[in-house]
Amino acid sequence: MNKLSFAGILALLLASAAQALAGDGEENGISTDRPDFTESTDTVALGATQLEGGVSVSRHALPAGASHELGAPFLLVRFGLARFAEFRLGSDGFALESKLVNGQWEQHAGSSDLEAG
């Protein structure tokens, strides 16, 4: 991930934290939407910001050789635009894959695209 992407995500995190701290004290339930393959039909409340994140770790002992995968930070920021609409900004972050091939570890790494909608 380049410095500009990291700075943008950091700015969003700080803005979301500031808004959460300045809340009106009302407790509202949250409806999370990560990690999954389908989008939730619930939206966050008007003016609310919700930050979701996760980490994925897997290890496999396959006949062809061992495999390890790490993915993080799997971020999703949801901004409530109306009672029925929200803006989403997300990314699957950084992925690292290691495979044991012919007795030697091969590593592949990269970052995902930023998703907006």
Image (cartoon, rainbow, N blue to C red):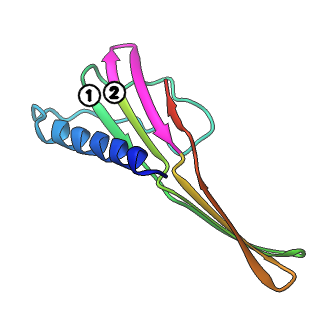
Q: Which mark is residue 11?
A: none
Q: Is residue 59 positioned above or below 109 on the image?
A: below
- Secondary structure category for the residue under label 2: strand
Asked if residue 93 lies left or right of residue 21, the reply is right
Disc 1 residue type (three-letter): Ala
Q: Residue at x 35, y 41 (%)?
A: 8
N-terminal label among 1 and 2? 1
Disc 2 residue type (three-letter): Phe
- Secondary structure category for the residue under label 1: loop
Residue 5: image quadrant is: top left
Q: Is residue 39 positioned above or below 75 on the image?
A: above
Magenta stretch? 80-91
Q: Residue at x 31, y 47 (%)?
A: 10
Residue 58: image quadrant is: bottom right
Q: Residue at x 29, y 32 (%)?
A: 49
Q: List the residue tagged with mark 2.
A: 79
40 vs 55, nearest the viewer: 55
